[in-house]
Every structure is written in C-alpha cells, then in structure tokens.
Amino acid sequence: MDSVMQDSQSARDRNFSEHVIFVLCAGSYSHEIGLVNFVKPLRTSSLLTHRLRDIVFYTDPSFVEAEWKTIANFPKLFVYPVRAFHYH
C-alpha cells in the first residue's frame, strides 16, 4: 500500500485532474464498508485503461488498509492520509 500513499508534494507532482475523491471519516476503529463496491463500478471492463479516472481516498490510511486486499489490484488508486477525523 505504500506505493499509493500521497503527500502534499507527490499529489502536486502527479497533478490530479478529473479524478474521483472519496472522503472517508473513518479510522482503524471503524467497520469495513466494502470499498470494492465503490471502486468496481468505476473500473468496469468496458473502459479503456487510459480513460480510467484516478481514485483518491482522503482518509486515515489504517481504514483503507483493512480493506486493501479487496481493491489492491485495481489501477489508479491513491490514498491521501488524513488523521484528523475524530468522531464519537
């Protein structure tokens, strides 16, 4: 999962454009939500690889890590780590 982690500089260098952002207010304590069900429709086989939009998860990386095994093989996924979400 380290290869898809983005920080401010790497995100600027990548110059994201026309991408999809998932903002997930969750952390390691959260239940899995089935990220594959969000990613799969955006990765339909009828789309050519160069037409796929980047998908950026804006969340605590520990949340995505719990479900990474189900989405790791999809292309153009990125995680922008945010650890400031604190909900009770």
Image (spheres, grey):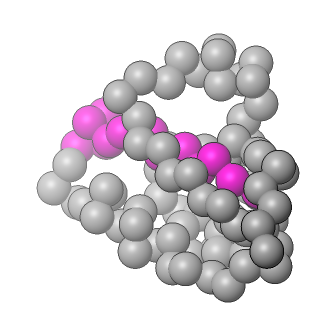
| Count of labels in the image | 0
Split into 4 quadrants, where in the image is the C terminus? bottom right
Nearer the observer, 37 or 50 = 37
Q: Is residue 31 left or right of residue 54?
A: right
Query: Residue 62, percent across and down?
Result: 80, 65
Split into 4 quadrants, where in the image is the N terminus? bottom right
Q: Which residue shows up at 83% across the image and 51% down it?
A: 83
| Visible residue check, residue 86 | yes
Query: Residue 6, percent across and down?
Result: 72, 35
Q: What is the residue that sits farthest to the left in this orientation?
A: 46
Query: Residue 21, percent across and down?
Result: 48, 44
Q: Which residues are magenta?
A: 48-60
Q: In which quarter of the view is residue 7 placed?
A: top right
Is residue 83 found inside the magenta-colored segment of the image? no
Is residue 50 found inside the magenta-colored segment of the image? yes
Q: Is residue 62 left or right of residue 78?
A: right
Q: What is the residue that sits farthest to the bottom in this orientation?
A: 31
| Visible residue check, residue 77 | no
Q: Is residue 56 left or right of residue 42?
A: right
Q: Which residue shows up at 36% across the image and 39% down it?
A: 53
Query: Residue 70, percent across and down?
Result: 56, 76
Nearer the observer, 19 or 46 = 19
Q: Which residue shows up at 76% across the image and 45% down it?
A: 81
Nearer the observer, 33 or 2 = 33
Q: Compared to 26, does 18 lie above or below? A: above
Q: Compared to 8, does 73 lie above or below? A: below
Q: In which quarter of the view is residue 66 placed?
A: bottom right
